[in-house]
Image: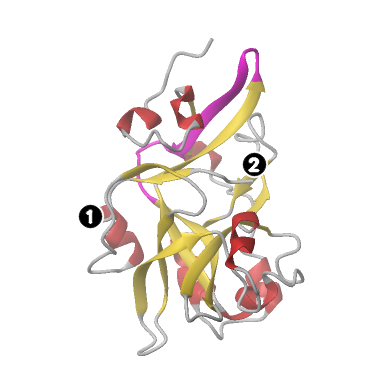
Amino acid sequence: MCGRFNVHDLSGALLWLFGMSEGPPQPPRYNIAPSQPVAAVRIASQGGGREALLLRWGLVPFWAKDAAIGARMINARAETVAEKPSFRAAFRQRRCLVPAHGYYEWRREQGGKQPYHIHMKGGEPFALAGLWEHWEGADGEVIESCALITTEANALTRAVHHRMPVIIDPADFDAWLDPAGKGGDARKALLRPYAAEERMVVDKVSTEVNSPRNDHPGCIEPVARG
């Protein structure tokens, strides 16, 4: 699964990557946790261009009676996303990209669960495959939410965890975001382990990451491997 990630600059290189002129108002985040707002890019309902906005992490299906279901819907598996009732409608029509500078996974080691920060060597941002939903409660409450799609880990990250979030190549942004787009098989073909392993780094980081209350630059600083 992918249960924590970071995006600490919603300007500059990140906006250029997504072809956006401005991003949503969000401070630097170094330890984003489920149920919190995350920046996302999707196709706007009017005009057809890309828009950036904040979505709640934890997808609430449009048919849900209780928004609390979102707490269990932070990840969708690439292998079943097209069939699962909670995700299949969003997979067909409501796909998004979630900017990230890195994500965290944990490995059980002597002394407890040890976090690792997985990111690009140059620190450049990348895009995670996401789904989004619009939900309206009986009392008029409106929630726009999202889930990240995971797949099998690549050879580099497998030593830490057997799953990884799907990273979408910039050349595939349009194909992924287009609400009409190609068929489901073509979209599913994009849900593969990240192949450019030579561009990635896996750093051991402080166990402060274990608590979502800790959200500061020290979360991404490497520590000595013991």
Q: Which residue is mark 2?
A: 154
Pick whichever, 84 or 142, lies toward us.
Answer: 142
Rendering coords of residue 51 (x, y %): 35, 74
Looking at the rendered structure, the kind of residue marked 2 is Asn
Above or below, 187 relative to 8: below
Rendering coords of residue 215 (x, y %): 36, 37
Q: Residues within 10 Å of mark 2 (few under 14, many from 20)?
A: some
Instruction: Tell me which corner region of the image, top left, top right, bottom left or bottom right, holds residue 213.
Output: top left
> Which label number is shown at residue 72?
none
Quarter of the picture containing the C terminus is top right
Q: Residues within 10 Å of mark 1 (few under 14, many from 20)?
A: few
> Which label number is shown at residue 12?
1
Looking at the rendered structure, the kind of residue marked 1 is Gly
Q: Label 2 to label 1, Cα distance in Å?
A: 29 Å
* Identity of the residue furthest to the front in this view: 139
- Identify which residue is drawn at 60% across, 34% down: 156
Q: Can residue 133 be found in the magenta stretch? A: no
Above or below, 210 relative to 88: above
